[in-house]
Amino acid sequence: MAKTRKGVEVSIAIAEAVRQADVDVVAAYPITPQTHIVEHLSELVADGELDAEFVPVDSEHSAMSVCCGSAAVGARTFTSTSAQGLALMSEIYFIAAAMRLPMVMALANRSLSSPLSIWNDHSDIMMVRDAGWICIFVENGQETYDNILCAFRMAENPEVMLPVAVNLDGFILTHMIEPILYEDDDLVRSYLPWKPMKNALHPDRPVSMGCFGMPEIYTEAQMNREMGVRNSYPHILDAWEEWGRLTGRHYRPVETYRCEDAEYCIVTMGSYGETAMEVVDMLREEGEKVGVIKIRLWRPFPLEEFRKAALGRKCLIVMDRAITFGGNQGGPVATELRSALYGMDGAPSIVNYVAGLAGRDVSRKDFRNIILEGKAKAAKGEVDGFTLYGLRG
């Protein structure tokens, strides 16, 4: 496929990126709103456009189990899921990271039940935030396409060998038709060369993996796991840097907008970043010194880059799309950022809003209200707890 721009559903663009990556195994189970991704992949395999094993499993638990087996023998592996599917998959999701098995997942973020919802928020990924996967958030279709390919490069780096989850907002992105610039197949293949996996399972060299760990070794195994995730950071940067060199589209763990002289910033993850930028432009015309800080890399958390972006501001208005129930401080992102800045000179106050749960619309007017109200709260010192925006009754 030559380099071309097409108006296409973002889910289809993900499937095309997986085809260009020339994966060996796709194991998946349908669940809204990620189903179109794997449906299109099944068509590509059936039509002979992708030479891969497509395994239509009986559940998401089985999907991740198949992915672990295929990744363990060195096969390039992809899967996709959402919400309750991830919950069912979670037992094996943790094992994939602990066993350092490189694979890529497109996670179409969706609310967890109950009550049942098929719409978007971030409660699913936050459920497994400590599993040990590399975790990326994207804002639009082009970023999704690009980062699926970057994710394979990250996961399969011999110095990384970890699974990668690319998080995209369900429906807000998965079912949106956007102009996507596809790179040509040769560029993608050069970016993702096949490399034999070190320590791959092979019948001529039988080994045991994932065995029982006595208390005498478990602590050390967990520290090894922590260091693996932490040490992946420079290789993540390298993957993005090389993609930027090849395509002109660059990514960073923390990205800012109009922050040069910003006294306060709104912090976002996912597709909300684009709306936030529009609203910041409007507020700038009114004389407000406001900017946007966008967290693209959630794990490993980009501590130094975040601090560089945040320190010296008067306040941060943090937008969460999940609640840490019973924690009394709101969402997981705000909790993380408070910890990252605790006790530091020049640390801004943090005002937390939880919004958009289960896809409830957050308009530009709402963003404007949140930013200005958050600024006022910070000025009054009202920074404890959180505000569940739009709560009725």
Image: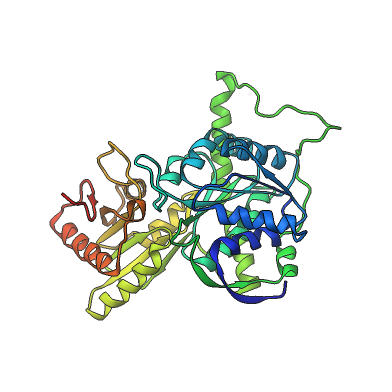
Residue at 54%, 45% in the rendered image: 230
Snapshot colouring: rainbow
Rendered residue at 57%/39% (across/down): 60
Q: Residue furthest left?
A: 380
Judge from the rendering whether residue 357 lies leftward or rightward of residue 90; answer left or right: left
Q: Position of residue 296 (x, y in %)?
A: 47, 58
Instruction: Please indicate whether residue 264 sits to the left or right of residue 258 in the image.
Output: left
Q: How many marks?
A: 0
Taking the image as drawn, is residue 88 in sight? yes
Image x and y of residue 336, in percent: 36, 47
Query: With respect to residue 225, does 190 lie above or below?
Result: below
Instruction: Give residue 104's position: percent from left, percent from top.
Output: 61, 50
Q: Look at 49% across and 50% down and name the residue there.
A: 32
Identify which residue, 155 or 4, lies in the foreground. Answer: 4
Can residue 21 be seen? no
Location of the N terminus by quadrant is bottom right
Q: Residue furthest right?
A: 204
Task: Identify which residue, 94 or 293, lies in the foreground.
Answer: 94
Image-based side of 77 in relation to 280, left or right: right
Q: Could you say which quadrant of the image residue 145 lies in?
A: bottom right
Q: What residue lies at 52% left-to-right and 47% top-to-bottom?
A: 31
Residue 297: x %, y % from top left: 48, 55
